[in-house]
Each structure stands twice: as C-alpha cells, then as structure tokens.
Amino acid sequence: MTESVVNSEDPHGPGGDDATRRDFIHIAAGAAAVGAGAMIAWPLINQMNPAADTLALASIEFDLSKVAEGQQVVITWQGKPVFVRYRTAKEVQEAAATPLGDLKDPQSDADRVKAGHQQYLVVVGSCTHLGCIPTFGAGDYGGWFCPCHGSHYDTSGRIRKGPAPTNLVVPTYEYVSDTRVKIG
Amino acid sequence: MSEHESTYVPKTGFEKWLDTRLPIIRFGADYMALPTPRNLNYWYTFGAILMLCLGTQIVTGIVLAMHYTPNTDMAFASVERIMRDVNGGWLIRYVHANGASMFFIATYIHMLRGLYYGSYKAPREMIWIIGCVIFFLLIATAFLGYVLPWGQMSYWGAEVITNLIGAIPFVGEPILIWLRGGPAIDNATLNRFFSLHYLLPFAILGCVVLHIWALHTSGQNNPVGILIPKEQTAKDTVPFHPYYTVKDGFAIILFLMMFAAFVFFMPNSLGHADNYIPANPLQTPPHIVPEWYLLPFYAILRAIPDKFGGVLAMFGAIAVLFVLPWLDTSKVRSMRYRPTMKVFFLIFVFVAFVLGWCGGQLPDAPVFGNMPSFVLFDGELNSFLWLTRLATAYYFAFFLIIMPVVGLRETPLPVPASISQPVLTGGGAMAAAVPASPEKKG
C-alpha cells in the first residue's frame, strides 16, 4: 500500500475495506487449517482407544458353586482379576454392622451385593490406589490387604485404612440363575 | 562466543566446491574451533559422556529390536532368546540395560553440576529448560523400555505408573483406558510402549541438538561463573579442539571402565530378580520398587497420604526444575562464591540420596531398629514414611524457599572480573581450584 485515503465516514477505519477482508480471509483460512488439523489428528489419537476385539471380551459367566464358604476364587475379566468371595455368616454380619461413619468411602454392604445373595461378594481385585492385587484374608479388617502401599479393606471390600481413595470396585453383574453370575 | 569468526579455509577444490553449496565442513570446523572457557573441570565432561550414552542406547536398541517380539505371549521368551541364542545377544542386552543406569548416573551428575555452578541463570535459561525436557523424556523412555521384557516388575511397574494417570480427577479414567488401549495392561499396551520406546530416543536426540545450539548461542558457563568479557576472550578461552576433545575423551575412558565393570561383572546388580519371572496379571510381587534412578521420585509419591496429591508432588518435583532460573534470586552464578548456598546445596545432594534410600524401603518399616517412637498423625515417627516426608519437605523447600531467600540475604564472596585474573593475581584459596596453567593442564 503506497497511499491510503482515510475517510472519517469509513466504518473500517484506516486501511479501508481491504484490511477487513484480508483479516477475514486470514481468520477463515486459519480456522479451516485448525479444523483440518483436528480432523487429521483425531483418528491418530482415537486408534489408541480399546479395539473392537478388546471390547468384545466385555462379559463372562461364572459358576458360583465352585467357591467354598470362607474362600474366594480369582477370575480374569477384561484382563483384570475379579474376586468372587463366599463370605461366612460372621463376615457378612461384620460388614453389615459397620457404621457408615467409620468409612472413608461410605457405602453400605447391602449396596455392594445383590439382595438374597449377601454371602457372595464380587469385586474387581485391583487396589484402588495404584492397581496392585490385595491379599485375601489379610489386614486389620479381615478383608484384604494391599502389599504395595498398605491399604486395608474390610469383608465388604471397603477401604478402611491406607492410601487407597475408594472401595474395591463392584463390577456390573447379574444372576442368570441361582448359581451363575454374568459379569460385565 | 557464538559470534566468533569462522577460521575455516577450504583447501582442496572439492572443499571449495562444497563450501559454497553445503558448508558442512565449515560447520564442523567452527564447532571444533569454538572458544571454550579455559577453566572447565572434570564435572564439565558429562555432556560428552551423555552424548556417548545416548549413542550407545540408540545403537544397541536398534540391534535389540531386530530380535525382540512385542507380544505378551512372546516378549519374555524373545528376550531370553536374545540372552541365550542370539550371537552376542547377552552382551548387547546387558549393555543396553546397564546403559540406562549409566545414562542416569551421568544425567544426575550433569544436572547437579549445572545447579552448583549456576548454569541455569541468564542468559542460559533455555539450555536448562531444554535439559529438563530431555530429563523428562529420558524418564519416560526408561520406563517404557523397562516394560518390554514383560517380567513381573515390568508388568506391575507399568500397572502402578499408568494408574498414576488414573488419579487425575474426572478425565483420569478415560485417559487411562486410552493410554492402555483396554481396561487393563495387555498386548495393546505392550505394542504401543515398544513403538514409543523406539521413538522417544530420537525426540531426545532432537532436543540434544537444541540443547547444544542454545549452549553455543549463549556460551558455555564455567566454574567461576562469570560471563567472559569480550576483550578477555583471547586470554580466557581455548579452542574446543584439542583441549576439551582430549579432556572429554579421557573422562569417557574412565566412565567406560565403570560401565564395563557393571556389564561384565555385575550385570544384574542394578535390576530386580523378580523381572526374570514372566508377567502374571493375577499375582503382585510382594515388594514393587522402580529402578534405582526413579526411587527419589517414587519416595515423594508415597510421602503424600492422598493419591492425587502424591501424583502432583511427584510431577511437581520435576516441574519445579523448569522454573529454577526464576526461583534463584542471586546474581552470582557459581556457588564457589556463595558459601551459604553451598551448604544448602550439599544438604540437597544428601537429601536426594536419602529420598532414593527411602524409595526402596517399605513405608512402615522403622529407620532406626527398635528405637521407641510414637504415632504422629498417620504413622510411626520412626518409620520411612516420616523420613521420606522430611526429605520431601527439604526437596521442595530448597527450590521454593531457600533459593529465593538465600539469594537475597547472603553476602557472596568477591567474584573475579575474568577467568585468568584469580590465577595471575594469586587469589588464594579461590585460585587453588583453578589450574595454574590451564593451557597445559586443562
């Protein structure tokens, strides 16, 4: 631009209409480039999410009659261990009698089992701290004890002491018959 | 120092032809002739040692990748095959595995040298920041590589470290699944970790180029810590070659002797026996510890009773390094002239070792045998938990409180006007640390 006439009535100020149109083209081109970049980036990012065959392994069935009273069976679900524990009457009673005020992550035992099947507790066997597998029957509360960083869980899989922030996760599951559960 | 005149004169016809098209010989010649402070001591040789470490890891790594199989069913066996059947595979793998430890030894010394001589201060902030990026990439690469043999420590280390990301509120869980490529650490995770472990060293290499570019732009620091006055350049500097190529070369030979001692006489002393057990997703080893070089950061993670708080503290311990140039309020670079700061620095080095020691212990274990103590908040006072917390507190206080406050309050010793001055005027104790005739000794 060698010369420009500044007109006080020109709403676009010095530089006139040209500058505004150029600005618009810059912004529009920039926005299109950003949009195109995002569209190219998305499949490259999304490919890291679980693949279809990984997601297809989402549910399994388990026969509860394999667990004896007072014991637990560890099964693998989605690559993670799942504890299926046949609790004794005393353990169920202890878990139910715990006042919610004593808990770090308050949840009643009844909310963690299916009605009519209180003796069976099904939880994901990964410590909610950093994912180690807690040891069965150890710790101060008779539930589980995580050897990595010292979290204590009670017989309902609830966190009672240690660094773990939440209770052991109860996966989505349902009873397909009286002795079979479908997890996932 | 960067603006030194090019002294390269192309001699042959080919050199003249090339010099006007791609002045690559000129670039190399100028690099070698670079005026370098004449008083650099052996702490300054670790840059060259680190270049050697990076080269060693890349070369051995590329070779190992020719025999390794990134699949959960075959990874462990393929590493064992490298150890037993591949020609010289045991040597290449031991060099690569111990090379990681050597890399970290040299990195930590290199960083502490920068800290002591104030190499992060203006005008060298960018060198330091890029160095911090390299350090972070190095940690990531080492972690990814440790997962590949698919032993018990590999698997559970990956489990624990990826779970750290799950601690981020709200977005943690989706990011965790995205990172692992499934609900748990599995084949998808191993595959991408292998891919990234191959990629990151080249990212490090790129950062090293930037690191050296920044170094040659702002000029090398030196043990006296002063910027060399322009009129002193001739007196205070020597050409990089042969003075420092020879000095670096000698240090590299000593370093390689230590490296070889590990590779040939105690190749597994820095590792964990548990990693020779194939990964088992249904059984956690009784005592999970990271490799030695990450123990201080692991200790900081465990010092905080809150999960997300622990993760923030651990990453904060690295993040604080990035802003170090603006935390130090002292104008004097070298701690040689900062007696007060020197004491705090030595305590810091000691504390870093304490943190490393704590990181390898069970938090509940007592520090001093059966010494009686009492429960303070959530743990026995005489336990590694509380020792770790004290050390963590000092670690952060050193950067966030001591650095800014001491810089404002201390009285530094007089700083010489040039590098050659303390030598020529016989500056007492100060001069004793500088070789009397650097052109002969250094």
Image: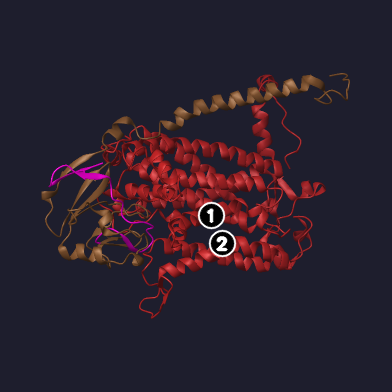
Which label is found at residue B316?
A: 1
Q: Residues within 10 Å of mark 1 (few under 14, many from 20)?
A: some
Q: Amino acid at mark 1?
A: Gly
Q: Position of residue B185 (x, y in %)?
A: 33, 43
Secondary element at tag 2: helix
Q: Amino acid at mark 2?
A: Phe
Span shown in magenta: A155-184
Would you say B306 lies left or right of B74 here?
right
Residue at 63% from the left image edge and 52% from the top image edge: B323
Q: Which chain is brown?
A: A
Q: Which chain is red?
A: B
Helix, strand or loop: magenta stretch: loop
Q: Quadrant of residue A120?
A: bottom left
Residue at 36% from the left image edge and 66% from the top image edge: A101
Residue at 40% from the left image edge and 38% from the top image edge: B178
The answer to which of B95 and A91 lies nearer the viewer is A91
Q: Quadrant of residue B383?
A: bottom left
Chain identity of mark 1: B
Would you say B393 lies left or right of A93 here?
right
* Alpha carbons under labels 1 and 2: distance apart: 9 Å
Q: Position of residue B164 (x, y in %)?
A: 42, 50
Q: Which residue is mark 2?
A: B396
Q: Is B90 above or below relative to B311?
A: above
Report whether residue B278 is seen.
Answer: no
B141 is within the stretch colored magenta: no
Chain identity of mark 2: B
